[in-house]
Image: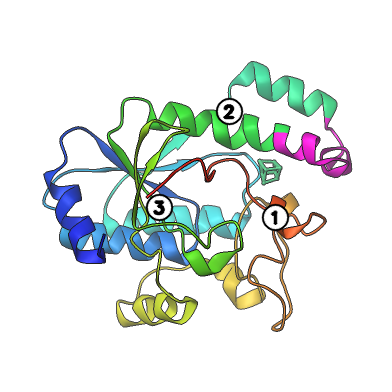
Amino acid sequence: MSFDLAFHLLNKLEGDIALALSYQAEDVVVLHLLKERLTRPFEVFTLDTGRHFKESLDLHRQIETFFNLTIHRYTPDEHELRSLEADFADEWAMRASLQNRKRCCNVRKVRPLARALAGKTAWVTGLRAAQSVTRENIHVVEYDESFQCLKFNPLAHWSEDAVTDYMNAHSLPNNALYREGFRSIGCAPCTRAIAANEDIRAGRWWWENPEHKECGLHTRKSHG
Ligand code: SF4
């Protein structure tokens, strides 16, 4: 499906739709596009993992002011979080195995996302195919079997430069971490700045192999 047709479909869909914000430039571009092109209401939410960078929390406030909206926060279950923090008081314990890291992502991201998407007809993301090997087959519109709703990735075929150009053309607020060498932004314990010659996602879960670098929010059970 084409980029333009995706927005047309979003306007026609019955039921609630929501944009997931993770404090990256792509999300800000998609939010601007939705505000420009949609004639219907939509929710904007973030997963409040408790591990975001200060710069990301600053961007949260800047986005709310710039777009005159409230970003809904979905937080981890308190009981699950206490158990997680008891087991992984030391960040290196969380990094000790893929299983441990995924347990943290499950508690702080995946389960809150399931609550955010419960009853929604569709969610919208800023994913791009060029971001990683785990995303190279994404489509502009997919059915997300994990969360049982439609998933719109309007920037699926955009380049990193196209995102930057759009941000600059519309003077949109951006995450200050990009000025410090970050090119993909997630939780602070799991994200670092990268060198110019490194892969765009090299700074995410840098201790893992590239094919593992997803948190469980964007599984490829989906199909186009
Ligand atoms: S990205 Fe890191 S800190 Fe954030 S939820 Fe996943 S493992 Fe936990």
Sequence-earlier tag: 3 or 2: 2
User: Label 3: how many residues lie within 10 Å, few (<14), some (14-19) or many (20+)?
Assistant: many
Going by the numbered disc 1, the residue's amino acid type is Glu
Where is residue 38 shown, x and y percent of the image?
16, 54
Q: Residue at x 50, y 61 (%)?
A: 24
The response on whether ligand 1 sits within 8 Å of label 2 is no
User: Label 2: how many residues lie within 10 Å, few (<14), some (14-19) or many (20+)?
Assistant: many
As drawn, the label of residue 211 is: 1
Where is residue 215 shown, x and y percent of the image?
63, 44
Where residue 116 sits, quadrant-wise, is top left
Ligand 1 resides in the quarter of the picture at top right
- Chain part drawn in magenta: 88-102
Task: Please name whichever residue, 8 or 194, is drawn nearer the observer in this view of the structure.
Answer: 8
Q: Main secondary structure of the magenta part?
A: helix
Query: Does residue 90 show up magenta in the picture?
Result: yes
Please identify the residue farthest to the front as the structure is shown.
223
Where is residue 19 shown, x and y percent of the image?
35, 47
Where residue 96 sits, quadrant-wise, is top right
As drawn, the label of residue 76 is: 2
Q: Nearer the viewer, mark 1 or mark 2?
A: 1
Answer with left or right where residue 48 lies relative to residue 82.
left
As drawn, the label of residue 57 is: none
Q: Residue at x 39, y 32 (%)?
A: 117
Where is mark 3, residue-wise?
125
Going by the numbered disc 2, the residue's amino acid type is Pro
Q: Nearer the viewer, mark 3 or mark 1?
A: 1
Sequence-earlier tag: 1 or 2: 2
Q: CA distance from mark 3 to mark 2?
A: 20 Å
Disc 1 is placed on an element classified as helix
User: Label 1: how many residues lie within 10 Å, few (<14), some (14-19) or many (20+)?
Assistant: few
Q: CA distance from mark 1 to mark 2?
A: 26 Å
Going by the numbered disc 3, the residue's amino acid type is Thr
